[in-house]
Image (cartoon, rainbow, N blue to C red):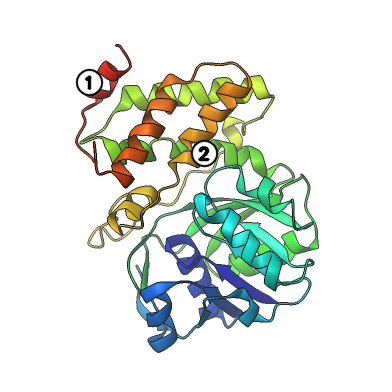
Amino acid sequence: MHWCIYGAGAIGGVVGARLAFLGEKVTFIARGEHLERMQKSGLVLVDPEGTRLVPVTASSSPADAALSSGDIVILAVKSQHTADALADLVATVPAGVRIFCMQNGIDNERQALRFFADVHGVSVTLLASFTEPGTVVAHSAPTVGILQLGLAAGGTDEGTTLAAEVLRRAGLRVDVSDDVMKYKRLKLIRNLGNAIEIVCSGPAPALLERMTTEAEGVFSKAGFTLPASDEVVPGPEPVDPSVPRLGGSTLQSLLRASGSIETDFLNGEIAMLGRIYSIPTPVNVLMQQLARDAATGFRFRQSLTEADVLAMLGD
């Protein structure tokens, strides 16, 4: 089975490197200096087990992977890049490939199902970093991360089982679910705080609580379920404090000066659902706007206190 890792950042890079280290056939799709370094000297994987240089195959186009029906594409780009990635895949790979959306947010699977029949959702809890071209860092071991996966439309299939078996051998805990999207909704709620890392100078528990309450309200109105408390698996903890993690995935995008962040598909998803179901979501709306300003216009970047934001809300 051929694995195509479309998006070789923190998540795609770590998962793909561990698959390649197992001897799986893996092709990375990347851009810029990150691609150049992988093509020239491989991908450096840093984790609590040490630093390894993993020889990899990397390209700028999935056409070079020569995928066949039944092969797996791990879509690991940020949500704001999903539409472009899918257009690239539609033009270059057979319709029978299996798409695994290893991404934050809950819109990616819907977009992928427009073009591909076999689309899997993957809820990812994995402490990883990508701030330097050619290098990815995993902060936990021996369990690198925790995945819930299943068909985005519900249920599982042969591809679910095959992927789960290999990913477990790569050091991941993998739970197969007939309703994977409920786990992805919970992960979205947890990711709402990414905007706080971008905008605020410190913790903002009151803001996070209000964003969470808004999200739970719109999900309930939409009839979207969440996992029961006994279905939630605690995430892995970093085991090597000497290798610091510089924040969540959204902050890492900001530090790399990538020019865009995914909060439009996190806080913005809650804002959109609020508009559809006529439920006010003022905190998520404001944090979406402030995070966008911080990423593109450098205003408010990690400079506001929680009191400042609450004042903007009229509190």
Q: Is residue 300 left or right of residue 265?
A: left
Residue 41 locus on image (x, y percent): 38, 87
Q: Earlier in the sequence, mark 1 or mark 2?
A: 2
What percent of the width, then of the height, locates residue 127? Answer: 40, 55
Marks 1/2 in contact by CB < 8 Å: the verdict is no
* Residue sitting nearer the eye, 103 or 182: 103
Q: Residues within 10 Å of mark 2 (few under 14, many from 20)?
A: many
User: Can you say whether 239 is above or below 70 in the image?
Assistant: above
Q: Residue at x 61, y 43 (%)?
A: 107
User: Where does label 2 land, which residue?
Assistant: 188
| Residue 128: x %, y % from top left | 39, 59
Question: Outermost residue toward the front?
Answer: 297
What type is the residue that disc 1 sits on?
Ala
Name the disc covering residue 9, or none.
Answer: none
Q: Quadrant of residue 141?
A: bottom left
Quadrant location of the C terminus in the rendered image: top left
- Residue at left 61%, top 72%? 4
Q: Amino acid at mark 2?
A: Leu
Residue at 52% in and 26% down: 215
Q: Is residue 105 visible?
A: yes
Q: Nearer the viewer, mark 1 or mark 2?
A: 1
Q: Secondary structure at mark 2?
A: helix
Whole-angstrom CA distance, mark 1 to mark 2, is 24 Å
Residue identified by numbered label 1: 307
> Residue 241's spot in the image, x, y percent?
25, 57
Q: Would you call the spot at circle 1 few (<14 residues within 10 Å), some (14-19), or many (20 or more)? A: some
Considering the image in quadrants, where does the N terminus appear?
bottom right
Identify whether 258 is placed above or below 52.
Answer: above
Q: Which quarter of the picture shows residue 40?
A: bottom left
Looking at the rendered structure, the secondary structure element under dot 1 is helix
